[in-house]
Amino acid sequence: STLFEAAMQEAAPSAALRLEVAELALQLKNFDRAQALADSVAREDDRGPRAHLLLARVALARNKLDDALMSARRSAVLGDLPESHFVLGQVLEAMSKYDQAVTEYALARRPPIEADASLGRARIMARLGATRDALDELQPLVKIPRLRAPAMLLMGDFYADQQQRDKA
């Protein structure tokens, strides 16, 4: 963090450095700092998808869904980054626009976030009642250590629901 701070004291830190510091600020939940830095980069280059992606993530973290939607759409259109489609899927899912969210998660199913997008699709399939399809999405995810817990939790919910219906 202090290395980033020292670099930020330069006369004109690069856009890439400001986005890295903004990313760190977002991770530390310093939303004002993250937004200010991402805004400064977006003002300089309104066609850069990464700044708009970061603005979308900050707005989503603040639960400002309309702002997140606008920034995520702009990022996806400008750069077609899998991360942009993933965040757009998250925003649409939070807004209960499940059909659109599934489409965005499908567009995000590329490295480096392919597995995260599959988890998002499975969550929506579950909400829409497509349990078998959701389970098929989840099977490979339990082999990924960082996704094992959420995938297994979702699978457990499916099986619990299925047993309840069998008892009814």
Image (cartoon, rainbow, N blue to C red):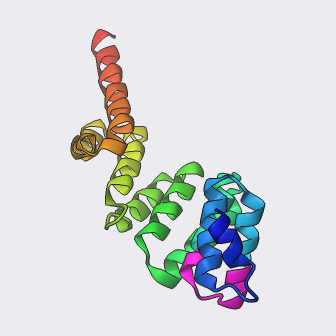
Quadrant in which residue 132 is drawn: top left
Quadrant in which residue 134 is drawn: top left
Image location of residue 75, percent across then percent down: 55, 76
* Front position in the image: 104 or 84: 84
Above or below for 114 versus 166: below
Q: Mostly what secondary structure, the magenta segment?
A: helix
Is 60 magenta? The answer is no
Query: The N terminus appears in which quarter of the rendering?
Result: bottom right
Which residue is farthest top? Answer: 167
Image location of residue 124, percent across then percent down: 42, 46
Above or below for 167 versus 21: above
Quadrant in which residue 39 is drawn: bottom right
Image location of residue 61, percent across then percent down: 65, 53
Q: How many numbered dots are placed on residues in this image?
A: 0
* Front position in the image: 12 or 70: 12
Is residue 78 found left or right of 147 in the rendered image?
A: right
Is 46 magenta? The answer is yes
Image location of residue 111, percent across then percent down: 32, 67
* Front position in the image: 131 or 57: 57
> Is residue 55 visible to us here?
no
Query: The C terminus appears in which quarter of the rendering?
Result: top left
> Is residue 135 visible to us here?
yes
Is residue 86 found left or right of 2 in the rendered image?
A: left
Q: Residue at x 58, y 81 (%)?
A: 16
Above or below for 62 versus 37: above
Is residue 125 found left or right of 38 in the rendered image?
A: left
Q: Residue at x 56, y 73 (%)?
A: 73
Q: Residue at x 44, y 78 (%)?
A: 80
Residue numbers of the magenta segment: 40-52
